[in-house]
Image: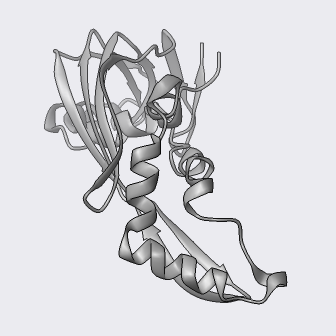
């Protein structure tokens, strides 16, 4: 199985960036300023239009695996940190921690830096907000780290915005995660 990423949640089906959102984005002062700089550049240095390429840019910016969102969120829970600390004392032993139904809030602020002729002419920062409601998850913890996640039900609600302009609004929607995600060192995962 492949890794499930935020891009699959936000950018599948008809919920891509709608035309009216593209038009609002094109009218945003910062976007217009960058587009004008691009338009005034010599022909050899011109870039394709920003707004027209927005979904391709968002695809890359949202290339964040769900397991990274989960593990980062769980690091804030005292009970999970406590079991991680306990597992350091017995690194050969795997601890299983069954989680009660809970929610994780996650915010990301990726940005696109625009260069023209080797000079940075601007940047565009997006605000990604995600709320996951999780039920039936079990963590496998060894040596102070979460080494695997036995998944349960995951319900997601989220937005992708540029300033006040909400480009994508999703959910509540069930996210189909693999049954078990085995984590590698550094937070990446392999699915089973």
Where residue 58 sits in the image (x, y, percent)? 53, 49
Q: Who is closer to the viewer here, 26 or 30?
A: 26
The reply to whether residue 85 is in sight is no
Q: Is residue 1 above or below residue 185?
A: above
Residue 135 visible to the viewer:
yes
Query: In which quadrant will I find the C terminus?
Result: top right
Of residue 110 and residue 186, the one placed in the foreground of this image is: 110
Looking at the image, which residue is at 37% across and 29% down? 90
The image position of residue 164, as x and y in percent, is: 25, 59
Is residue 43 positioned above or below 163 on the image? below
Q: Is residue 38 left or right of residue 157?
A: right
Residue 165 lies in quadrant: bottom left
Of the 4 image quadrants, the one containing the N terminus is top right
Q: Is 169 on the left or on the right of 99, as rendered? A: right
Q: Residue at x 39, y 13 (%)?
A: 151
Horizontally, residue 63 falls left or right of residue 156, namely right
Residue drawn at x 22%, y 17% is 99
Quarter of the figure with residue 27: bottom left
* x, y percent for residue 169: 32, 36
Q: Residue at x 31, y 41 (%)?
A: 159
Quadrant of the rendered image containing residue 46: bottom right
Q: How many marks?
A: 0
Estimate the x, y position of residue 71 in percent, counting from the top left.
37, 36
């Amino acid at each position: 199985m492949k890794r499930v990423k935020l891009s699959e949640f936000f950018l599948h089906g008809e919920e891509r960036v709608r035309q009216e959102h593209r038009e609002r984005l094109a009218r945003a002062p910062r976007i217009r300023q960058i587009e004008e700089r691009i338009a005034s550049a010599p022909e050899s240095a011109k870039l394709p239009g920003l707004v027209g390429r927005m979904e391709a840019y968002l695809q890359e910016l949202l290339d964040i695996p769900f397991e990274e969102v989960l593990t980062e969120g769980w690091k804030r829970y005292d009970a999970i940190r406590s079991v991680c600390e306990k597992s350091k004392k017995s690194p050969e032993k795997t601890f299983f921690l069954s989680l009660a139904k809970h929610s994780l809030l996650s915010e990301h602020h990726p940005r696109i830096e625009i260069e023209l002729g080797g000079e940075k002419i601007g940047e565009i920062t997006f605000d990604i907000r995600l709320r996951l409601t999780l039920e039936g998850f079990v963590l496998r913890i060894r040596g102070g780290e979460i080494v695997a996640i036995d998944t349960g039900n995951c319900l997601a609600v989220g937005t992708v915005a540029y300033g006040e302009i909400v480009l994508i609004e999703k959910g509540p929607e069930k996210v189909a995660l693999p049954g078990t995600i085995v984590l590698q060192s550094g937070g990446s995962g392999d699915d089973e």
